[in-house]
Amino acid sequence: MATLRRALIVSTATLALAGAAAGTASASTTGAFLTLDKEIVRAGEQVRVLAGCGVEGLNLVGSTAFAPTGQDGPYTGNGGVAVFAVRSSALSWGTATVRADAAPGVYQVSERCGGGHAGSRELTVVG
C-alpha cells in the first residue's frame, strides 16, 4: 500500500510539473521557484501554479489579479492567493482564479517564502 501511495504521489507531481512546464518559471539562488501554466489569460480564467521554497517553506503565492479566497493575507481587499491542493516546502501546486473584473494589463504574481519575497512572474490579462 505504501509503495502504491508513493507511486501515486510521484505520478501526480510529474503531471503537475509537466503541465506547468508549458508556462513561465522563476527560480532563485535560495531554491525558491514559481511556475505558472500560462502567462496570458482572460478575466475569470484559472491559472495553475507550481511553487517551492526549499527549507524556508511556502507562505503564499498571490496577485492583485487573483480573485479573493478568504485566506488572502496581504492581498485582503486587493486581490487573492492561489489555493494549493498539495502543499509542502519542496513542491506545492494548486490554482488561482483571475478576478472576473480584472482590467486588461500586466500583473505581478508574487511568491513569499519564510516571510520574505522570493520572486515573481508577470501575468497578462487580455480583454
Image (cartoon, rainbow, N blue to C red):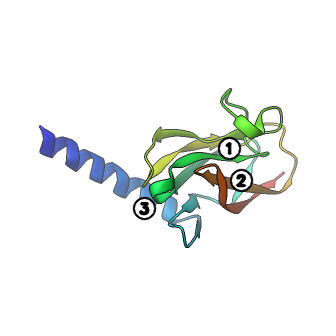
> Residue farthest to the top?
70
Give the image quarter of residue 24: bottom right
- Label pair 2/1, CB-CB below 8 angstroms: yes
Q: Nearer the viewer, residue 53 or 87?
A: 53
Residue designated by label 3: 18
Q: Is residue 68 above or below residue 33?
A: above
Question: As shown in the figure, which amino acid type bears the numbered disc 3?
Answer: Ala
Q: CA distance from mark 3 to mark 1?
A: 20 Å
Relative height, residue 48 to residue 27 (above, below): above
Q: Nearer the viewer, residue 116 or 41?
A: 116
Residue placed under numbered mark 2 in the picture: 41
Residue placed most toward the observer, 122 or 52 = 52
Q: CA distance from mark 2 to mark 3?
A: 19 Å
Q: CA distance from mark 2 to mark 1?
A: 6 Å
* Mark number displayed over residue 120: none
| Marked residue nearer the N-terminal end (3 or 1) | 3
Q: Quadrant of the N terminus?
A: top left
Which residue shows up at 47% across the image and 49% down it? Answer: 92
Residue 15 as seen in the image, left or right of residue 77? left
**Residue 95 in sight here:** yes
10 Å crowding of disc 1: few (<14), some (14-19), many (20+):
some
Q: Is residue 112 above or below residue 97?
A: below
* Front label number (2 vs 3): 3
Query: Residue drawn at (53%, 65%), measured in percent from left and top?
Result: 22
Q: Position of residue 47 (x, y in %)?
A: 61, 48
Q: Which mark is residue 45?
A: 1
Q: Position of residue 30 (x, y in %)?
A: 54, 67
**Position of residue 121 measured from the top left corner of the image (x, y, whole percent):** 69, 62
SS category of the residue bearing label 3: helix
